[in-house]
Image (cartoon, grey):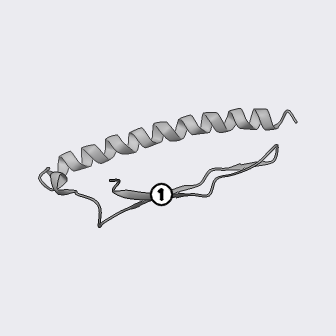
Amino acid sequence: MKSYSTYDRDRLDAADKMKIERGIYFDTKGADISPLTALPLAELMKLREESAAAEQTVFENLKVQASAWEEQAGKL
């Protein structure tokens, strides 16, 4: 069971506009964070930094793909 829910408002208007908008929400009822409660604060902060870095990598890759869309959309 996922401990989060998501929504998207993605939209593509060919040769005009691409919009990718995502949101994520923590599910307080379905999540089991008990393993995290035993970790020291420094470890939690390290895990958060690693997660943020991984998210940044995904974001940078999406920006590359958005540039590829711009090039393709500009051909029409």
Say which of 16 and 5 sits in front.
5
Q: Residue at x 68, y 35 (%)?
A: 67
Image side of residue 38 versus residue 76, left or right: left
Q: Residue at x 76, y 49 (%)?
A: 17
Q: Is residue 67 above or below residue 36?
A: above
The image quarter containing residue 53 is: top left
Q: Mark 1 belongs to which amino acid? A: Thr
Which residue in the structure is indicated by mark 1? 6
Q: Residue at x 31, y 47 (%)?
A: 48
Q: Residue furthest left?
A: 38
Q: Is residue 69 above or below residue 9?
A: above
Q: Position of residue 19 (x, y in %)?
A: 67, 51
Q: Is residue 36 above or below residue 57?
A: below
Q: Position of residue 43 (x, y in %)?
A: 19, 45
Image side of residue 68 versus residue 75, left or right: left
Q: Quadrant of the C terminus?
A: top right
Label 1 Cα crowd, 10 Å radius (few <14 / some 14-19 / many 20+): few
The image quarter containing residue 54 is: top left
Instruction: Tally the numbered discs.
Output: 1
Circle 1: element type: strand
Q: Residue furthest bottom?
A: 29
Q: Residue at x 62, y 58 (%)?
A: 9
Q: Residue furthest front?
A: 1
Image side of residue 39 versus residue 1, left or right: left
